[in-house]
Image (cartoon, rainbow, N blue to C red):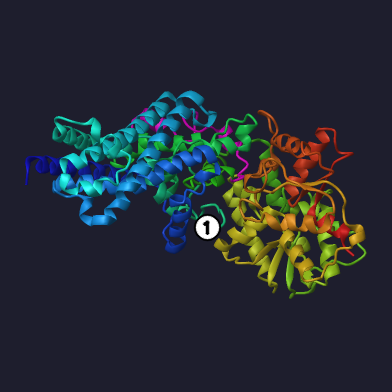
Amino acid sequence: MHLQNIVFTVLFLAALSLFTYNLLRIRTYLMIGRKDNRFSGAGRRLLKVLGIGIGQSKILRDPAAGLMHAVIFWGFMVLITAVLEAFIQGFYSSFSLAMLGKVSAVFFVSQDIFGTLVVLAVFYALYRRLIVKPKRLQGDGSTNSDAVFILMLILGVMITMFGVNAMKPIVHPENAVFYKAHFIASQITPLFSGSVILLFNIFWWCHIIIILTFMNYLPYSKHFHIVTSLPNVYLSKLGPQTLDTEEINFENENVFLGAGDIEQLTWKEMFDGYACTECGRCTSVCPANLTGKPLSPRKIIMDIRERVTEKAPLVAGKKEIPAEIGRRKLVSEYYITDEELWACTSCMACVQECPVNIEHVNSIVDMRRFLVQSESRFPAELLTVFGNMENNGAPWAFPQSDRLKWTEGLDFSVPVASGKQEFDVLYWVGCSGSFDARYQNVSRSVAGLLNKAGVNYAVLGTEEKCNGDSARRLGNEFLAQTMIKENVETMKKYKFSKILVSCPHCLQTIGNEYKEFGGDYEVVHHSEFINNLISENKIEIDESKKIDKKITYHDSCYLGRYNDIYEEPRDLLKEINNGELTEMKHSKDRGLCCGAGGGRMWMEEKIGKKVNIERTEEALSVEPDIISTACPFCMTMLTDGVKEKGRSEEVKVKDLAELVLESSK
């Protein structure tokens, strides 16, 4: 073994040991968090890694910047062959991929192509960050300098690789015929003469040192996501987005009351901080941030990481925590303020756009739970809402006895579960469908369609209570679980095959979150259900009654991003409309929230522009006759917005069910 091999071996083992030490160090930090099982469904998780991680599908939602990042990522995947060749040469100087004969040409050509693309992508990245300066990339000075340093390291890896490849034919003439495949690097080979072996060794050692420096800098860098992003995609939620929770034992004095500091977060919520790329895509689509609220989803995740860095070493090492650090709670003026947390609409736009599947909303709700259940610190108007839910089973002060008032005046009777016991479909009317004067007409429309189609259904009537969605998103998990358990017990009394809902919040909560509490139901939204009735010819559209208007459709966040229902509402509108169906600028999975989710329905907006006005203005910009919705919260917010803009006489806000009933035979 030559001296060079000995020096390399020592350096490599030292660098690998330091990198391993840092990985284990960070792992001990994560272990102080709450448990969270993220390892089931390995096959589905690997498919996500292939699509989102390797395929860069979410990165490419932003074509220009996305392609730049994808090129760098794919380039490094391809160029791992050059890195491996260099590292193996550290142990065995005579090693070369040229030993593979003609097959080596594939590796050498790909190294030149992708090496060039990566260099171009790095220069574009530097141009964007230093010249263009997109708002979403702007952070503190250390964030920008860290990013530039990382880009320069990448550039160094590429330049030294080309330097090594350019001199291979001279240093190893026996393999020159194969090295011709380095069709770009070979163009600069003639530039080198004289001490070629010395230059080759300089380039080779620089290549090795930059890579080992890069590797060991990352755990201390804000770009540690280069290591953690693929694992984070693998560990992200499978299926619909649901809240992390556990069934509360009200007798247990150590029960989880929310996350006021890092120890109360799950280990995965802390890991999200290490996976954050700081790209700012989450903040750029956040409706609260867009309308001047203090919330930045990127800042939330970065604050979690900063607090973990500050406190976790002390907790993990069982060291005494200085008073100053102990006073600096995660949820406090030092890191994440109350105003930031209460601004969230839980619309999931941040999660949808995150290229590494960070789950911002779970962390926000956990911190809201701390504010509500541990601190009793929440907006004053929520005291009334919580009281109404507890006493009346709904966010409003209407008595349970009024739950069937929406049926008054119908020319047919609405069957009640207590009088049937067994039926095919349970129509879950919901609080808005029962009490909100405007949305009661949607309930009547749905019931009218069910009656026309001869569906064997029933409603719970006075036995129905709020599904618990708003209480959960507002952090009052005690109240939410009480309501959930009561509803599950009520539904156990009846036999039915599926639950029909008009409210996407009911769809999400009952369909995806009741399972944790023994309520495993098939739940369908009325847009899906009515579509099926039409396709089965149980509801017929009257050609003479078809609408001839310009319609735009607003995607509910809980119907779309939470449950991936985008086409069914549009299919219905195409079925009943002879006019134009026009999409807004932000539609489908890029849709803009109406502002009511996450319990914001019950709170006043006191900072910045109202979210519903922002969305209403976008809807009105396409000059529609009708703004169609499929959610009671959205209907309320858009109706109020149209009124505030003085357009209620010319532009109507209507639910899908109303439009179908008007067009049916």
Residue pictured at 57% horizontal, 66% vertical: 518
Q: Is residue 613 left or right of residue 376?
A: right
Res 142 seen here: yes
Please provide percent x and percent y for residue 510: 64, 60
Report the span colored magenta.
Answer: 320-348
Please provide percent x and percent y for residue 559: 66, 53
- Above or below, 640 against 529 in this view is above
**Count of all numbered marks drawn on residues in the image:** 1
Residue pictured at 62% horizontal, 48% vertical: 589
Please provide percent x and percent y for residue 340: 56, 34
Nearer to us in this view, 287 or 315: 287
Is 482 covered by the magenta stretch?
A: no
Q: Is residue 86 left or right of residue 312?
A: left
Please provide percent x and percent y for residue 640: 79, 38
Task: Please rate how many residues cluster around mark 1, counting C-alpha atoms within 10 Å: few if below 14, some from 14 to 19, many from 20.
Answer: few
Res 32 seen here: no
Identify the amino acid type marked 1: Glu
Asked which quadrant contains residue 495, the reply is: bottom right
Q: Main secondary structure of the magenta part?
A: loop
Nearer to us in this view, 428 or 445: 445
Q: Is residue 545 left or right of residue 35?
A: right
Q: Is residue 525 left or right of residue 623?
A: left
- Above or below, 483 against 185 in this view is below
> In the structure shown, which secondary structural element does the residue marked by tag 1 occupy?
loop
Nearer to us in this view, 109 or 70: 109
Instruction: Give the residue number, with chain letter if any, for mark 1.
Output: 247
Is 333 covered by the magenta stretch?
A: yes
Residue pictured at 74% horizontal, 34% vertical: 613
State which quarter of the image contains the C terminus. Answer: bottom right
